[in-house]
Image (tube, rainbow, N blue to C red):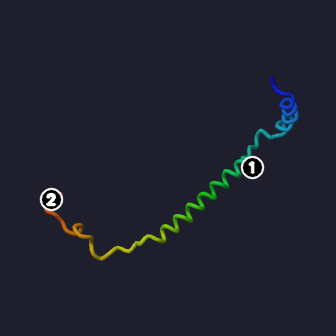
Amino acid sequence: MPSVNAHLAMTHLVPLAKEVDDDKVTPGVLGFIVFAVMALAVWGLMKSMSKHMRKVDFKESAEAPSGEGKTSAAEPGKG
């Protein structure tokens, strides 16, 4: 059995709901908050990624590490 407060709230909120235009749908405050949180998360990830990318050394060494520069007799295609 619904309480008196719930019934009173429903009678006051139903007229407000009928004022909403059926052809116009907006995301509202919750949609804005979710979008803002996602935007902040992407900004933080991009900032972190740029910090990590600055630490990466892209210069290749002139010498190949031992064993990788030499070819073996068992290479496919050479026989």
Is 54 left or right of 8, judged from the image as shown? left
Residue assigned mark 1? 29
- How far across and how far down the image is residue 66, in percent? 23, 70
The quarter of the image holding the N terminus is top right
Q: Which mark is residue 64?
A: none
Look at the image and tell me in which quarter the C terminus lies. Answer: bottom left
Label 2 to label 1: alpha-carbon separation = 66 Å
SS of the residue under disc 2: loop
Quadrant for residue 25, please give it: top right
Seen from the viewer's position, the closer of residues 11 and 20 is: 11
Q: Mark 2: which amino acid?
A: Ala
Q: Earlier in the sequence, mark 2 or mark 1?
A: 1
Q: Residue furthest bottom?
A: 62
- Amino acid type, residue under disc 1 in the picture: Val
Residue pictured at 77% horizontal, 38% vertical: 22
Instruction: Say which residue appears at 56% left-offset and 65% top-offset.
Output: 47
> Does residue 32 sit above or below 52 in this rendering?
above
Q: Is residue 61 left or right of residue 8?
A: left
Residue occupied by mark 2: 74
Q: Quadrant of residue 18?
A: top right
- What is the x, y in percent for residue 17? 82, 37
Number of other residues with Cα within 10 Å of mark 1, as a class: few under 14, some 14 to 19, many 20 or more: few
Q: Nearer the viewer, residue 7 or 39?
A: 7
Nearest the eye: 14 or 10: 10
Q: Is residue 28 above or below residue 8?
A: below
Q: Residues within 10 Å of mark 2 (few under 14, many from 20)?
A: few
